[in-house]
Structures are given as structure tokens and as C-alpha cells.
Image (tube, helix red, strand yellow):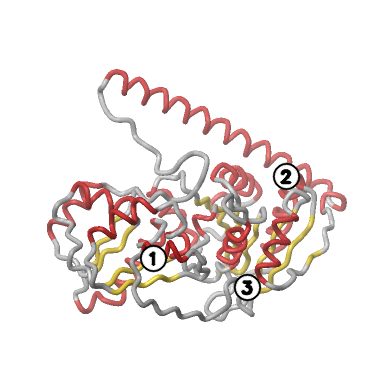
Amino acid sequence: MTPTRELALQIKNHFLDLGSKFGLKVLCLVGGQHVEDQYRAIKSIRHHIIVGTPGRIVHHIENCRELILGRIRYFVLDEADQMLGGNFDTQLETILSKLPTKRKTYLFSATMSGNLDKVQTACLRMPVRLETAKKYTTVDNLDHAFVFLPDQKRDIYVSKLLADLGGSISSESRTIVFVATARESVRLGEMLRYLTRKDRVVVLNGLMRQEKRGVALQNFKSGEANIMVATDLASRGLDIPEVQLVINYDVPTHPSSWSESAKAYVHRVGRTARAGRPGRAITLVTPYSATRLKIIESALGSRIPQLPWIDPSKTDPQLLHTIDQATTHAKTVLRNSDRRQKQLEERRSKKRRRGSGDAEEHDEPPSGDSDDAF
């Protein structure tokens, strides 16, 4: 089980790549795909491996008698710290109640929480813990730094940095820009599309339909796009080759604890410098987020180097004018999107009142971006 659909689909594909010659049958149960198709797959084929997200697995447990988990021998939680972090408690309890007590349970994560009560919830007996590094760490081949700058100058810095890199990196190299919210990913993505070739920038967030999420991720992996603006949906587990640069548009923040912000930082910057390759990560720090940076440095046990801030708009006035135009364009796109969404919700409301059909639900709450997996 994984917390996000994209990671589940990636794991499914790896299983198929490794086991297709042996006739391995893999069932993938994630949200955003037709429930009826999954019902038919459950009923028609006996599978060796089930990969999925908690919400959709629970849905099938409750609605499909053919999904029998009593013969499961191995139960694996990927990104276990997030899976045991509270958001999936009810779903995990339902799933665990259907599993045999005699099984092997594996928890995997780049960062592991110290909440032993959560581990006990997973019914571990005589657990063995294997650690390859300290609690929060980054790889040696990662060059990470931060820039301290005014909040309103972040768009200028990101635009100038990407423009400068555009002439010095290969077409296979990729950049991920992490933002805090789905709405911010759309705004910044539209701004960068205005400033560069539209097809070179993709957006990934939890409010997108699954089909669009899959297309965006595939275009980025294949190199058709070389810039991805994403929420933390893309920070865990996804194996994307040739990511040269990660930009944290803001310092990662987590409402539950400061240590969670440090974990989010490790996972974000971990999208680059993979498999022994060098990588670079730059975090934009404003007066509003400086405290969070100190917490992250404390968790890492080392200082993050600071890069100098030189306002490019002072040496290139035309750049500021161009970015202002791009920002105006992005805001217009957002307003139009909000208008369409409001009209869609009004139509759904009318349909509900007439009783002519069910309204289509979002996968995610509008206020956040965690994948609820249904």
C-alpha cells in the first residue's frame, strides 16, 4: 500500500517489468479509475500481488465479496511514516482486520516517525529495524542551498533561474518546482508557460483528475516537458530520471509538527541526486519562513549554505515587465477556472435537487493536497 496513486501505479509497473516473464499477475486498486473495471479485474483473475491506496482498497473490501485478503502472506507499507501519520488510521484498521495474523509486515520509508503506538497499530511482533542512515539526511552528491529574498520577488527569481538554466542544461535534464498548494501550482505553472514554451511545463497536484495527472507525469518522465510545478504529491517515492534541479518555492511546512517539515524537505530534495547522479536543490526563504528553515537545519544537523540574492529586475527592467505580464495572465487563467468550477458546482447542485444523478466528487479536499486514495 502507498499513500498516493502515482506511486502505486509506478510500483505496479515495476512488478510487471520484473515478473511478466514468470506470468506474474498484479492488481492495482487506486482512485481516479473506474470502479467497475476494477470489480471485473478482481473477479476474473487470481492475482499474486495487490498494489493500491487505502481508500480504494477499503471501498472494494466493503463492496466486493470477491476481494479476499485472508491468504495474504506479505503486507508492505511504502512511505510508512505518512501511512502511519494519522490520515489513514480508519482505513488501515479496516484493512488490517481482514488480513491473517500470521503474515510478514514490512514498513519502508526514507524518514521514519518515532511514534511507536502507530507501529503497534500495524500489528508488528518482534520487529527488526534496519537503518541505512540517520533520521533526517540528504545524500552526499546533493548540492543544496537557500536564497533569502522578499516574498514578492520569488516569481522573478524562479523565472530568471530557469531562464539561465535553459541555455546551459541538456534537453534531457528536468526541474521540479515544489509549491505548498494546488492553487499555487496552477498559478505558477501558468506563469512559467507564458514565459516559455507551453508544452515544456506541466503541473501536478491532487485536485487534478487522475487521467491528467498521469499524462503530466508521463510527459515529464519522457522529457516532452522539462519543468514540473508540483505539490508534495510528487515528493515521495516517484522515480524520475535526470532531475537536475529541485526548487522549493517555499520552505516546506506541515501543520502537525516542525519535524514533519524537515521530513518534507528531505523527500522534496530527494527527487534529485538519485542513483549516484549529482543534483541541486534551492529553497526560497522569505522573512515569513526563516524560522522553518532553522528547524530543518536543526533536524539535518548541519547548516544549509546561503546563496546571494541579487534582484535581476534592477539590471534587467524588461524582465520585470515580462513577468508582470505573465503574472497577469496566470491570474486571468485562475479566475476563468474558478468561474467554470462555480458553474459546474451549480449544475451539480441542480442535478441533486432534481434527483437525476449523483454529483461527481473531487478526490481531494479543496484546502489541501494529500491523496485520500479513493
Q: Which residue is mark 1?
A: 120
Label number found at residue 279:
3
Label number found at residue 323:
2
**Within 10 Å of the Cα at label 3, are there few (<14), some (14-19), or many (20+) other Cα atoms?**
many
Amino acid found under the numbered disc labelled 2:
Ile
Residue 152 vs 222, above or below: the answer is: above
Structural distance between the alpha carbons of marks 2 and 1: 52 Å
Closer to the camera, 285 or 276? 285
Indicate which label's residue lies in the foreground, 3 or 1: 1
**Within 10 Å of the Cα at label 2, are there few (<14), some (14-19), or many (20+) other Cα atoms?**
many
Residue 103 vs 355, above or below: the answer is: below
**Within 10 Å of the Cα at label 1, are there few (<14), some (14-19), or many (20+) other Cα atoms?**
few
Amino acid found under the numbered disc labelled 1:
Gln
**In the displayed structure, does residue 15 sit left or right of residue 206?**
left
Residue 255: where, in percent of width, then height?
58, 49
Amino acid found under the numbered disc labelled 3:
Gly
**In the displayed structure, does residue 213 sit left or right of residue 161?**
left
Structural distance between the alpha carbons of marks 3 and 2: 27 Å
Q: Is residue 327 visible?
A: yes
Residue 87 vs 351, above or below: the answer is: below
Closer to the camera, 151 or 193? 151
**In the displayed structure, does residue 246 sit left or right of residue 95?**
right
Residue 359: where, in percent of width, then height?
33, 30
Indicate which label's residue lies in the foreground, 2 or 1: 1
Q: Residue at x 50, y 49 (%)?
A: 205
